[in-house]
Amino acid sequence: MGGALDSSFGPPNTNTPDRLDEPRLCYNTPEIPCINSGDMANYTRSRHDGGVSVGVADGSARFVSDNIDRFAFQALGSRNGEEVIPGLQT
C-alpha cells in the first residue's frame, strides 16, 4: 500500500477488513480484505504461512506468529509503553 501504516490493534492476518479512505487503494482480495471508509485502519498482514514479518524500531525484522497473544501483539505495537507483555518477564 505504499506506506508503513499497519496497526497491531488486530491480530496478525486478521479477517477484519482494512478501512481505507481512498477507493483506488482498496482491491478487496481474499488475503487483504478492505472497505472504503472515511478513515484509515490497516492491519498487519503477510502472505507468509502462519504469521507476518514486521520491521522493528531497531532496524531488524522479526517473524510474528498468527497465534501470538492478541494483547502481547497490541503491547508490542504501542508507543505508550509500560504495557505488561504476556510471556516476557524482566
Image: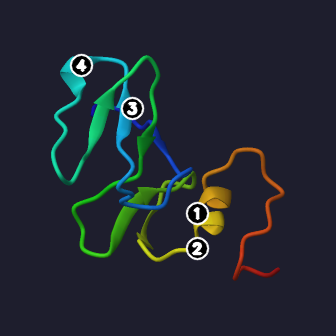
Q: Is residue 17 left or right of residue 24?
A: right
What amino acid is labelled 3 in the image?
Arg
Density class for disc 3 (Cα within 10 Å; few <14, some 14-19, many ≥20) is: some
Callout 1–callout 2 Cβ contact below 8 Å: yes
Residue 50 % position (x, y): 31, 75
The answer for how far apart the CA atoms under marks 1 and 3 are is 20 Å
Report the residue at 41% width, 71% height from top: 66
Type of amino acid under label 4: Pro
Left or right: 67 with respect to 45?
Answer: right
- Picture coordinates of residue 52, whole percent (x, y): 36, 64
Q: Earlier in the sequence, mark 2 or mark 3?
A: 3
Give coordinates of residue 16: x percent, y percent: 39, 49
Picture disc at residue 19: 3
Mark pair 4, 2: CA separation: 32 Å
Which is nearer the eye, 55 or 22? Answer: 22
SS at mark 1 in the image = helix
Query: Residue 69: which disc?
Result: 2
User: How far apart are the two marked residues, 1 and 2, measured between alpha carbons?
Assistant: 6 Å
* Label 1 Cα neighbours within 10 Å, binned few <14 / some 14-19 / many ≥20: many
> For the point 43% across and 17% down, which residue is it?
38
- Between discs 4 and 2, the one toward the N terminus: 4
Crowd class of label 4 (few under 14; some 14 to 19; many from 20; radius 10 Å): few
Numbered disc in front, either 1 or 3: 3
The residue indicated by pointer 1 is 73
Report the label total. Answer: 4
Q: Amino acid at mark 2?
A: Asp
